[in-house]
Image: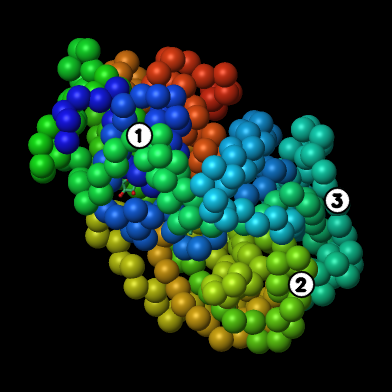
């Protein structure tokens, strides 16, 4: 490989593939380095489906970023000819006053989004396979849907390469250093230099940017797929939405309609063990399957038919579950993005745009104050 670039992107998962595409689209000489294969299943960006939604219960500050992501995902679909997004509508359901319901209402109202508030009776009528409790309610948003994560990563890589980027797989970065005028990146096959380094190492961010001592925890999450036992057509896209259930005193649960070739996927949000991404146990136990079955059966009894498969995926959590997107606090030629805390995928193209802005312009028009690592600074 030539050994000097305008920018190097370290890690080509959801965020790195997007950053590579945005940097390359701006005409820069960019190189992406990835330790594994394209759209691999050892990080955070695999498993056939991801939720995208607008009435963001976590914080209204995310809404402008996700609205931009809708535009960019549509442009990427158009530019690459890949099918990335399926609009299904989304139901945020839970106990009255739960964060999932109240937070979704707050974001929808603050940003004038389309939504409907549904009582338990209305939820049952609209989606007859659901079993909300009488004291539960929901917020339905029509524009929520499913992203196909492996296709999304491949689409960003395709777009990047079409704009002239180089992408090297099976190439772990074993070290990097700031040189004063740029960065030097070390791989087993040689040393490469660039003016800018973009670090998007996902669960490995804590290792790659060890010098920052970021308070990150990698969490093991299990995804499970079923073939419904009955009412198949009621779980199909068009009739059944993506959903998130925030029940009093229970771990939040979320899931998808049945997707062609996949079945119906559901999973807990958080509640997994803290792990090391290099040594995590990727086998799913019978107990884990049974616990998920029980929780899902109380909400969608007909969904829990034949268990098809399970897989492990990794969250990289910050203490407040907000992202880290920022220039490196000590090195002006380095930017980083990570700590997506299990809800980053939908934002990937916006994050790519922001990283390209920060690396090439030194600033961005997007509001990223919430994502500064300075919030973790010890006082
Ligand atoms: C089960 C599960 C469900 C989720 N559901 C949703 C959802 O519904 N909606 C949503 O928006 N988000 C969801 N998320 C979160 C979302 O998928 C993640 O926030 C997002 O994928 C993170 O992308 P990333 O690029 O930071 O990490 P990754 O995709 O893991 O990419 C990091 C990459 O860096 C590479 N790398 C690391 N270190 C090195 C090195 N030294 N040298 C070379 N390469 C390196 C890794 O191999 C990896 O490919 C979910 C996550 C999981 C696990």
Q: Tell me the residue at 66%/31% (across/down).
A: 64
Query: Which quarter of the picture shows residue 22?
Result: top left
Q: Nearer the viewer, mark 1 or mark 3?
A: 1
Residue sitting at x 61%, y 53%: 85
Q: Residue at x 81, y 69 (%)?
A: 127
Q: CA distance from mark 3 to mark 2?
A: 17 Å
> Comparing marks 1 and 2, which lies closer to the viewer?
1
- Quarter of the image where the C terminus is located: top left
> Does residue 152 lie above or below 273 as drawn?
above
Q: Which residue is label 1 attached to? A: 164
Q: Which residue is mark 3?
A: 116
Q: Residues within 10 Å of mark 3 (few under 14, many from 20)?
A: some
Sequence-wise, which precedes: disc 1 or disc 2?
Answer: 2
- Mark 3 falls on what kind of element? strand
Answer whether residue 317 is visible to the viewer in this image. no
Residue for badge 2: 130
- Between the C-alphas of marks 1 and 3, the distance is 45 Å
Frontmost residue, 325 versus 59 = 325
Left or right: 68, with 345 as reference point: right
93 or 164: which is nearer to us? 164
- First-in-chain label (1 vs 3): 3
């Amino acid at each position: 490989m030539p050994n000097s670039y305008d920018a190097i992107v370290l890690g080509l998962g959801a965020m790195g593939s997007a950053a590579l595409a945005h940097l390359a689209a701006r005409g820069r000489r960019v190189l992406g380095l990835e330790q594994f294969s394209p759209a691999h299943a050892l990080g955070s960006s695999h498993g056939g489906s991801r939720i995208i939604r607008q009435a963001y219960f976590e914080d209204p500050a995310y809404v402008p970023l996700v609205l931009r992501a809708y535009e960019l995902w549509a442009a990427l679909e158009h530019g690459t000819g890949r099918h990335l997004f399926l609009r299904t509508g989304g139901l945020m359901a839970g106990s009255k006053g739960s964060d999932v319901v109240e937070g979704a209402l707050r974001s929808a109202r603050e940003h004038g989004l389309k939504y409907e508030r549904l009582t338990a009776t209305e939820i049952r009528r609209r989606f007859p396979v659901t079993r909300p409790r009488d004291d539960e309610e929901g917020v339905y948003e029509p524009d929520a849907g499913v992203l196909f994560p492996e296709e999304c990563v491949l689409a960003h890589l395709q777009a990047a390469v079409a704009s002239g980027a180089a992408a090297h797989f099976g190439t772990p970065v074993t070290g990097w250093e700031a040189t004063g005028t740029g960065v030097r990146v070390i791989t087993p096959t040689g040393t490469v230099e660039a003016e800018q380094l973009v670090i998007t190492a996902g669960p490995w961010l804590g290792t790659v940017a060890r010098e920052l001592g970021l308070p990150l925890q990698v969490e093991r999450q299990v995804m499970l797929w079923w073939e419904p036992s009955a009412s198949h057509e009621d779980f199909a896209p068009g009739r059944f939405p993506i959903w998130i259930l925030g029940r009093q005193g229970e771990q939040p649960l979320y899931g998808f309609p049945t997707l062609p070739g996949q079945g119906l996927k559901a999973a807990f949000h958080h509640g997994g063990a803290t792990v090391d991404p290099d040594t995590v146990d990727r086998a799913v136990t019978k107990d884990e399957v049974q616990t998920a079955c029980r929780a899902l059966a109380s909400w969608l009894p007909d969904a829990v038919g034949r268990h098809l498969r399970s897989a492990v995926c990794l969250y990289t959590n910050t203490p407040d579950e907000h992202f880290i997107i920022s220039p490196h606090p000590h090195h002006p030629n380095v930017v980083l993005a990570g700590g997506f805390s299990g809800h980053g995928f939908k934002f990937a193209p916006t994050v790519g745009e922001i990283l390209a802005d920060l690396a090439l312009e030194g600033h961005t028009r997007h509001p990223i104050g919430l994502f500064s690592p300075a919030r973790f600074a010890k006082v």
